[in-house]
Amino acid sequence: MTITKKVPQNMTSMRLDKVSSEIFTDYSRTQIKKWINDGRILLNDEFATPKEKVYENDEIQINPIEEIKTEWTKEKIEFEVLEEQKNYLIINKPYDLVMHPGAGRKNGTLANGLLYRFPELKKLPRAGIVHRLDKDTSGVLLVARNENFRNYFVDQLQKRNIKKKYLAVVVGNIIGSLEINEPIGRDKKNRTKMSIRSDGKEAVSYLKLNEGLGKYSLLDVIIKTGRTHQIRVHLASKKLPIIGDKSYNPSSNISKNTSQKLMNIIRNFPRQALHSSQLEFNDLGSNKSLSYCAPIPDDIKNLIKQLKKEYLNT
């Protein structure tokens, strides 16, 4: 049976494991910490680490009877596997695909598809998923195939040794590169969103101009930290909203003097134009540097083509 409780005001900015042990008093902090790592405790319907900070009205879900992953069923889901190794899989996640089941969604997710194609993943917490992409973000993603590599990769993530690079098509321009170092926390007015908050968690993003597209830009974004919605929040905070982002660019900002045809294309773009393009890490054992890339999907490629046609005559 799953039990859900909200974080009280006096526990804001405290660690998830500490808060959980104080509001679920029937269980020890040691047990709570293990359950967080095993995927039996969720924070706002997402997996988190024991050290994760929580805020007032965040929801903590606990299932002391069985791991949440045991509720997941295998299902045929379309996604591309870029690489299969004995320790991991490299996935090219399509947009409009949720990572794993959560509140109100029991199937139709990447996790369901992973269990269908790789049944051995049922032995692992979260079906081997060790990091995530938003539903409408496409691109490269690693899935662990055994507990040893899973623990290694999570440790590398926590030590910030994993390099993640994204492509974003945004409204506006930058010259050269830009570092954004602004803490992020859950939005006080809307718990489904994140925002820049002085009491939030450290969040660092590095932007570099990949290509100018008139009054729009194709940016390379490398994130040092991996906060929920980090790139989308950071770019919106610098008035560089991502095209198609309905949460952080809800009014579909358009640059001045954009033609009506291009305006319609931009406003009808079906998702945020954000793509996880590259993942780099050192392999377990050999420490060899590995790099995997996912090609730009057709929808973003066509969007860039239309912007070039409008401004660069190409």
Image (spheres, rainbow, N blue to C red):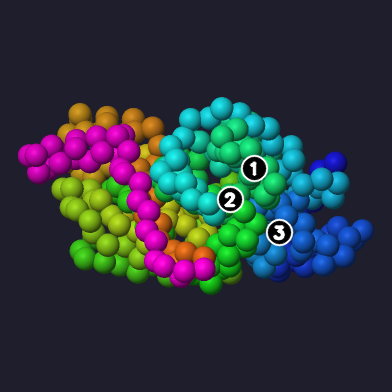
* Magenta residues (range): 285-314
Look at the numbered discs 1 and 2 and tell me whether their residues touch, using CB distance below 8 Å.
yes
**Image position of 129 with respect to 77: above or below:** below
| 94 and 225: which is toward the camera | 94
**Image position of 87 with respect to 289: above or below:** above
Q: Secondary structure at mark 1?
A: helix
Q: Is residue 106 left or right of residue 139?
A: right
Looking at the image, is mark 1 or mark 2 earlier in the sequence? 1
Q: Amino acid at mark 1?
A: Glu
Q: Amino acid at mark 3?
A: Asn
One can see residue 237 in this view? no
Looking at the image, is mark 3 or mark 2 earlier in the sequence? 3
**Residue receiving disc 1:** 120
Query: Dot 1, crowdedness within 10 Å: few (<14), some or many (≥20)?
Result: some
**Residue receiving disc 3:** 37
Quadrant occupied by the C terminus: top left
**Image position of 75 with respect to 307: above or below:** above
Q: Residue at x 65, y 57 (%)?
A: 147
Q: Residue at x 85, y 41 (%)?
A: 1
Q: Amino acid at mark 2?
A: Arg
Mark in front: 3 vs 2 = 2
Estimate the spatial distance between the alpha carbons at disc 3 and disc 1, rounded to whole Å. 19 Å
